[in-house]
Image: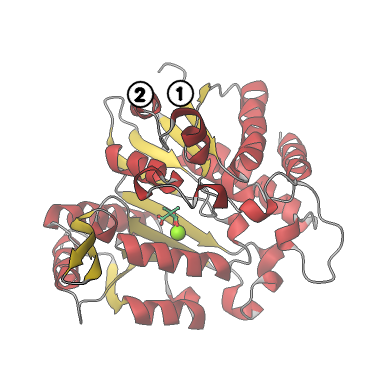
Amino acid sequence: MSTPSLLILPGDGIGPEVMAEVVKIIDWYGDKRGLNFDVSMDLVGGAAYDKHGVPLADETMAKAHEVDAVLLGAVGGPKYDVLDFSVKPERGLLRLRKELDLFANLRPAQCFDALADFSSLKKDIVAGLDIMIVRELTSGIYFGEPRGIITEGNERVGINTQRYTESEIRRVAIAAFELAMKRSKKLCSMEKANVMESGILWREVVEEVAKDYPEVAVSHMYADNGAMQLVRAPKQFDVIVTDNLFGDILSDCAAMLTGSLGMLPSASLGAPMANGRPRAMYEPVHGSAPDIAGQGKANPIACILSFAMALRYSFDEGAEATRLETAIEKVLADGVRTADLLGEEGATPVTTSEMGDKIIEALNASL
Ligand code: IPM
Ligand code: MG
């Protein structure tokens, strides 16, 4: 196969800083493991707006269609709050997800041993936690029509529509069942079938798909109860499948169980391309954190772990993904911490780029 191609879109805020560390890791794989990537860089979000007047240029969208995987940093910032909704930085990200049809968003929440004390929950509740949230990413209330702000009589009305077709539910359910088969064969589906018709359909379709996976133990939970259970006893879960909006909220909640939003990667996967690889975009779950941007304070681990997911899901390099994850585990076990991972009276944190260097050192030691 030809050299795999990557499109890197660092974006806004801390995006460029954390992505710079990923680039170091990519270079390391080229130098030390003979794993070369054909890398191109482009703009997304506010950075793209500043140059092109839109949060994602058509040429960038076209490039995203051509590459084997997209790596995205983060989008958004207060500077862009005043922009019209249609050109806000987030629209760039949503366009990528929608046009690449990346319907299955994998958000693993794993608690590293070295950080178990750092969670806002008690250590025994989170130690060893390893769950995978599969969030539907291209439909639901994020994209449903009708939408907008209209005037009715003498007042304005804000409208969004939760809409799911059977096939949209089925394909993300299949992705979740396939993952469950590779993990501990346990799947919990979350919706609000008690108040939403789309939730009733969601539950029915998940049950239909379940018939093809008799080995998987399936359960259903109302999403509000799911939020409560995630903080009460998160280890009861393995794979969770849910819709776009519930998945957005539940994954932030799950992320925080692990100690810091700065640790959580994600993979957004679509249908296979002609070369057999899935359409894919990888991004940290955290946002652009404008309050700390440009200060070297950001934690690059979520973004680096997102590249590890790319190695595993796009490039069939599971062993190299594990090598990278193990290097990160080692660095954390050695007590290396960025500012987000320090307690109140913690020691001196390392900078974003020092964290990247430490991870490279651990990678070198792994050879
Ligand atoms: C996420 C983010 C995005 C979302 C925003 C930035 C549009 O919160 O990826 O979770 O709501 O999906
Ligand atoms: Mg979110």
> Can you name the residue that lies furthest to the top here?
2
Q: Alpha-carbon distance for marks 2 and 1?
A: 9 Å
> Where does label 1 land, which residue?
5
**Mark 2 residue element:** helix
Q: Nearer the viewer, residue 184 or 275?
A: 275
Image depth: mark 2 or mark 1 in front: 2
Residue drawn at x 33%, y 75% is 223
> Where does label 2 land, which residue?
66
Name the side, left or right, on which 138 lies relative to 93. Answer: left
Q: Amino acid at mark 2?
A: Glu
Residue 267 on image: x %, y %: 43, 46
Badge 2: residue crowd in 10 Å (few <14, some 14–19, many ≥20): some
Residue drawn at x 58%, y 60% is 261
Instruction: Give whichever of discs 2 and 1 has the lower sequence position.
Output: 1
Residue 290 on image: x %, y %: 62, 52
Name the side, left or right, on which 181 lies relative to 351. Answer: left
Q: Amino acid at mark 1?
A: Ser
Q: Nearer the viewer, residue 202 or 248?
A: 248
Q: Is residue 138 above or below residue 345?
A: above
Residue drawn at x 17%, y 59% is 164
